Image (spheres, helix red, strand yellow):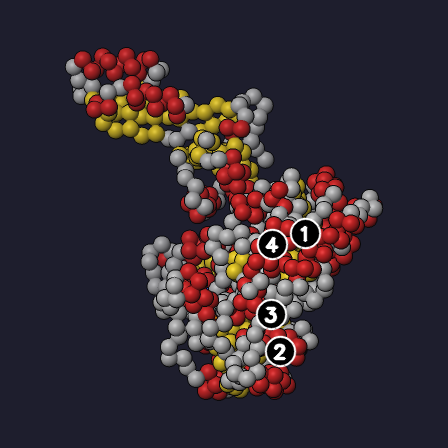
Amino acid sequence: MQISGAQILVQSLQAEGVEYVFGYPGGAVLEIYDAMFQQDKFKHILVRHEQAAVHAADAYSRSSQKVGVALVTSGPGATNAVTGIATAHLDSVPLVVISGQVGTPAIGSDAFQEVDMLGITRPCVKHNFLVTDVRDLATTVKKAFVIAQSGRPGPVVIDVPKDVTQALAKFHYPEEVFIRSYQPVSKGHTGQIKKAMQVLAGAKRPMIYFGGGVVLGNASQELIEFVQLLGAPCTGTLMGLGAYPSTHSQFVGMLGMHGTYEANLATQNCDVIIAIGARFDDRVISVPSKFTDAPKKIIHIDVDPSSIAKRVPVDVPIVGDVKQVLREMIQLWKEKSYVLNPSHLEKWWQTIEAWRAKDCMYFEHDEASQIIKPQFVVQTLARLTDNDAIITSDVGQHQMYAAQYYPFMRPRQWLNSGGLGTMGVGLPYAMGAKVAHPDATVACITGEGSIQMNIQELSTCQQYKLPIKVINLNNGYLGMVRQWQEFYYSDRYSESYMDSLPDFVKLAEAYGHVGMRIEKSSDVEGALKEALAMKDRLVFMDFITDKKQNVFPMVGNGKGLDEMVLPPHMVQDAERYEADFREYDTRSVP
Amino acid sequence: MRHILSILIENEPGALSRVVGLFSARGYNIDALSVAPTEDASLSRLSVVTTGSPSQMEQMTKQLNKLIEVVKVTDLTESRYVERELMLVKVRAVGKDRDEMLRMAEIYRGSIVDVTDKTYTIEVTGTTDKLNTFLESIQSSLILETVRTGASGIGRGERILRI
Ligand SMILES: Cc1ncc(C[n+]2csc(CCOP(=O)(O)OP(=O)(O)O)c2C)c(N)n1
C-alpha cells in the first residue's frame, strides 16, 4: 500500500518513539499537519514563534535525553528557526528539525516563501538533508536521528518540499542505516588511557575539569566515582554544572570568566589537568597562552577529535565516549592501585582551602535598605526548592547568578545557552523541560531584557497549562552589557538602559497567569514560597533588584585565570591576593 | 606551508559546498580546488591546495573528517606524491614573437592547441611551480588569457586513497 510523504514522515517519527513535536504550521507543511491530526501517538505543541519551537525541542532533549523534534514551515518559518538551530549546534544538542520547502519544481525560482534552508543552516547544523524523492524520506529520517544522537550530538535539518509530502510511496522504516562516511569513535585508545593514568598518578597538583560532554554522554556516575577515587579537586564549566554534585567538598566551583576564585586559581596553578568532555573554550580559559604559561600536563578526553588540541596543546589526547573512557580509567586506576601522593595532595588541598576561605561568592545583603540582591533571590530559591528544581536561564548577569548560586545536584537540571549565548531561550527552555518532566518544579531565571525576546510564549504556556515559575531579575538594565560598559567603557551606558518596561504583572495576567512584583528583600522568601505553592499556575515574579550589582569574580578580556576582577570585599584583601600568587608561583616550577 | 589535501566525498549534491563552506567558515583560504568523480561513481575526489601551519592543517583535516559526506582525507604533502596542473595560455604571436613562443612551448614540453595568425594557445601541464615559471619566462605583455585547473595530486607508489 502506498501512503503520502506526509504520512510517511509522521509514521517515521512514531517509529522513532517521538512523544512531542514542537512546531508552527504554514502552507508548505499543511500536508504534514493534516497527517499529524489523524494520529495520536505523539503530541504537537503549538508555539507562538518558530524560534521557541526549536528552543523548546532543544530543552526537551537536554532534560530528557531524547531527540528533540521541531517542525516549521518554509521561508519565514525556516529562518525563524535558525537561531534555535545554531543554539543547539553550539551546545551539541541532538535535534531533528523538519522544515517545509516549496515544491521541487519551484525550488530555485524565488517562489513564495522560498529560502535555501540547506544553504542557510549549513554552518550551524551537524548535517542537513533536502529530500527530493518521497522514496528516500523514511531512510532520511532514520539517518537524521542516527546522526543527531551519535558521536558528538547535534541538530540535523530535514528540508521537505511540499510535493514530496503529497507524493505516494510504500512505507518501510529501516531498523538500521549504514552511512559509510560516518563512523564515530566511541572506545578510547587503550594505550593512551594507560598513559593518561600514569601521568595523573604522578601529579602533585592534579585538577579534574569536566564540561557539557559529561552531561551529554550521561557519564555523571562515572565522573563522581572517578573524582572520589582520586580525591582530587574538580571544577566544571557552565555547561558541565550538575554532572558532579555542587555541594560536594571536592567540587571547587565553576571555572572561567565568572568562575570561583578557588576554581580559577587551582586550574591555573595545577600541574596536571584532565579535561573530560570539556573543550577549553575562551569563556573558560580565556587566553590559551596565559593558561599554558603556568606549565601543566594536559590530558583531554573528547568524543570529537576536532575539539582536542584545538585551543591548547595536549599531552595525552583520548578520542572516545566519555562514559566508556571513564569506566576504563576507573578500572585501570584500581587495578594498578594508583594513589596520588598523599603529602602533595594534602598540601594542594590546603592551598585550595585557603583560597576557598576568601569566600568569593559573598555578597552584601543590607537588611535596612531592603534592596533585593539578585544573588539572594537565587539562593533563596535554591533553599526553598531543596536544590532540586530544573532551572533554565536566559543570557546575562542573571544567568551567571543562577550558575553561581544555585547548587546543581544532578545532570540535566541546568539548562542554558552556553555556546551561542542566546537571549530568549529561558522561557521556551522551561516549556521543553516542563513538557518532559510534568511533575518537576521548573523555574526560568531571566532578566527583563531576555524575557522580552520570547515573551509571547506565555501564551503557549497558557494553552498547554505549563505551570512554570518565571523569576525575572529586573534591574532595569541589560545588566551584563552595563557591567562591561562600566568596566571597559568608562560608564558610558550606551543603549544598555531599558526604558519603557511593560508592567510584567499585568502582562502575565493578560495571558491568564499569576503576576507578582517584589520590591523589598524581606518579601523575597514569602513571594517565592507562595509562588512555589501554586503548583498548577504559571507565576511570573518580577523582582525589582539592585540596578548596579555586578557579577564577580570576573576574568576580563585578554586576562589569565589568575587575574580576576575580585568582588569588593576581596579587593580590600588585594595585597594578600598578590601574595598568594608569589607563594604559589608555579611558573618557576619546571 | 603549502599543502595539497586529497579528499574522497560522497558524490551527492551539496557535498562540495559543505567542504568549501567549511574553509570559509573557519577562515582558511583555498588556493586551488579541483573535483571530479572517481572510478567508483558514488565517490568524488577533491584536491584542495591550501596553506597553513601544522596545527591549522591538523584542525582542518579533523574538521573535514567531521563532515558526514567526507569519506577520507589525506594530506598528500606529508609524504611523497605526484602533482599535476593543466594550464591553457593564449599568447600574442606575431613577427619574431611567433618563433619565440614556439621555442618556449617546446622547452616546457607544452603543445600548441590552437593557432590563429595573431595568437597561439599553448597547453602546459606540470607542477604548479613549473606552470608559474613558464608564465614568468614569457613576456607578460604578450599573455592574453590564462586558465588553470588547479593542482591535482596522487600519492607515489603503493600509497592509495580509497575506501
Ligand atoms: C539574542 C541576543 N542579543 C544580544 C545579546 C548580547 N547580550 C548578552 S547579555 C545581554 C543583556 C541581558 O540583559 P537582561 O536579560 O536584562 O539580563 P541581565 O544581564 O540584566 O541579568 C545582552 C544584550 C545576546 N546574548 N543575545
Determine the quadrant in which ligand 1 lies: bottom left
Instruction: Check disc 3 and report its element: helix, strand or loop.
Output: loop
Return the residue at label 2.
A380
Q: Is residue A390 left or right of residue B91?
A: right
Identified at 69% across, 55% down, the residue is A351
Tell me if mark 3 has few (under 14), some (14-19) or many (20+) residues whose alpha carbon lies within 10 angstroms of its own: few
- Which amino acid, by three-letter code, is at mark 3? Tyr
Specify the farthest residue to the front.
A575
Residue B50 drawn above or below residue A370: above
- Are labels 2 and 1 assigned to the same chain? yes
Q: CA distance from mark 3 to mark 2?
A: 14 Å
Q: N-terminal of the two: label 2 or label 1?
A: 1
Q: CA distance from mark 2 to mark 4?
A: 35 Å
Viewport quadrant of the C terminus of chain A: top right
Q: CA distance from mark 2 to mark 1?
A: 31 Å
- For disc 3, does the CB lie below 8 Å from ligand 1? no
Q: Nearer the viewer, mark 1 or mark 4?
A: 4
Instruction: Check disc 2 and report its element: helix, strand or loop.
Output: helix
Identified at 22% across, 12% down, the residue is B99
Q: CA distance from mark 1 to mark 3?
A: 24 Å
Q: Position of residue A284 (x, y in %)?
A: 56, 55
- Which amino acid, by three-letter code, is at mark 1? Met
Q: Is residue A383 left or right of residue A549?
A: right
Q: Nearer the viewer, mark 4 or mark 3?
A: 4
